[in-house]
Image (cartoon, grey):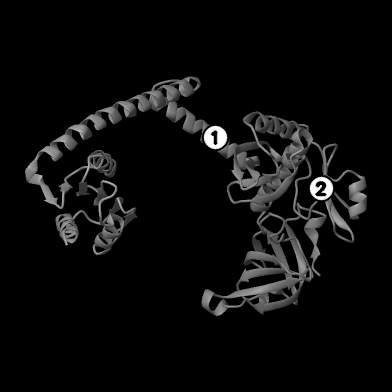
Amino acid sequence: MTERLYYHDSYLKEFEARVVSAERAEGAEASGERWNVVLDRTAFYPSSGGQPHDLGTLGGVRVVEVIEREDGSIVHVIEGHVTDRRMGEGTVHGAIDWARRFDHMQQHTGQHLLSAAFIELFQFPTVSFHLGRDISTIDLEAPALSAEQLESAERRVNEIVFEDRPVTVRFGSAEELARDGARKEVRREGTLRAIAIEGFDLQACGGTHVARTGEIGMILLRRAEKAKKNWRVEFVCGERARAAARRDRELLIESARQLGCGPAELPGMVARAIEERQASYRSRQRLLEELVSVEALTMLAIRSTQERAGGTRTLARVFEDADADYMRMLASKLIAEPGVRVLFASRAGGHLVFAQTPGLPGDLGALLREIVASAGGKGGGTKDFAQGSVPSGRGLDALIEGARERLKG
C-alpha cells in the first residue's frame, strides 16, 4: 500500500520517494513511451470520490494520470522511462502541479460547504459529486429546488467562507465519526479520514482540502436542473468563481450596450423585445395563413395544374423558396378538400411534403421514404402525410415527377 502524504498535508508540493516498481504501460508502444510507476509514498492524489487526479512531474518527467489500485497502491502514469539517471538510486523527486491542486482543494472544500448547507437549510442530502474542469456539480435528493432556495444556500456558504473557519483532518472509526455528528453515515471498517469544518460540517473524505474556509474565496451557484430523480446544482469556487463573475459582468455590459440601455434596465428591455417578437410572430402567422388560403384556392381552381385519376386530384409543385412550414400548412389546407393529393418540394433546403385526403389509396409515407432515399435523403410519415429532405435541391423535378408516375400506376 502506498503511503498517502496528502492525507496529512494537502499543501505539500514536493517530496522524495522510493520507486517500488516501474512497468511499461499496456499499449505504450503505440501511444508513445508511458510507464506505470508505483512509489512507497506519494503526494499525488489519484482520481477518486469525484475529484480528478493531480498532475506534475516525477524526476522531471510528466505525470499524466494517477490511478488507485484495489490493493491500495497508487500508480503514476508518466510519459518517459523512469529507470534512467534522473531517478537516482531507486528514489525519485516528485513535484505537484500546484495551481491545479489548489483549484481542486477550493472546489472540494466548497462542495463540502454546499452539501452541509443544503442539509442544514432544507434537509436535501447530496447523492453524488463531480469536480469538472470548468464546472463542478452536486446531485441533491430533493423534490424540487427553487431560485429562493439556491440563493439561501449560496448566501449561507459564503457566510462560512467569509468567517474563515478552520478546516482540519480527523481520523476515527465510522462509529466515532457518527457519534461526533458526521453528515453522512459511512459503512466501512477500520480507521477513516474525515474533514471537519469548525462548527459546521464533519464528513468522511479522502480528498485534498484548504486549511481555512477563507481560502475558498467565494462560491457561486451557476444553475440547477432536474437530473432523473435528483436535482443537479452547478457551482464554481475561488478563481473559477471570480472568472465567472467577470465574464457575467462583461456579457451584461455588452448586452446592455447593444440594446442601448444600462445594465439595470436590461431585464425590462429583454422582456419588451420578447413581447415584440411574439407579437411579430403572431402577425406573421396570420399573414401566412391568409397567403396559404389564397394559394390553396388558386391551386384548386387552376385546372391545368390538376391531374384527375379515379376522382383524385393530384397537385404537384416544386417551389423555389418555400420553407417546410409553409408547404406543410398549404398541404394541410388542400387535403381538407375531398379527393386531393399533393406532392410538394422546395429548392430552398430540399424539403418534400406528400399529403392526401384521408381515405385515399396509396401509402405516401412509404413512397416518400423510397423517393428521398434514391437521392441520398431521409424522410417518412404516415400513409396520408409524409415529409423529408434531400441533401441538395437539385433533381427535385424528377423526384416529384417520379412520385406522380408511381401513383398513376
Residue 25 relative to residue 306: left or right: right
> Residue at left 27%, top 39%?
329
Residue that label 1 marks: 246
Along the line of sight, which residue is nearer the eye, 298 or 185?
Answer: 298
Along the line of sight, which residue is nearer the eye, 70 or 325?
Answer: 325
Along the line of sight, which residue is nearer the eye, 325 or 124?
Answer: 325
- Residue 61: image location, x then y, percent: 62, 68
Q: Quadrant of the C terminus?
A: bottom left
Q: Residues within 10 Å of mark 1 (few under 14, many from 20)?
A: few
Residue 262 is tagged as none
Q: Is residue 23 above or below residue 5?
A: below
Along the line of sight, which residue is nearer the eye, 24 or 193?
Answer: 193
Dot 1 or dot 2: first in sequence order is 2
- Residue 312: image location, x then y, percent: 17, 49
- What is the three-letter code of the residue carrying label 2? Lys
> Residue at left 75%, top 46%?
210
- Residue 164: image location, x then y, percent: 78, 35
Residue 184 is tagged as 2
- Residue 7: image location, x then y, percent: 81, 56
Q: Is residue 117 above or below residue 39?
A: above
> Residue at left 8%, top 43%?
303
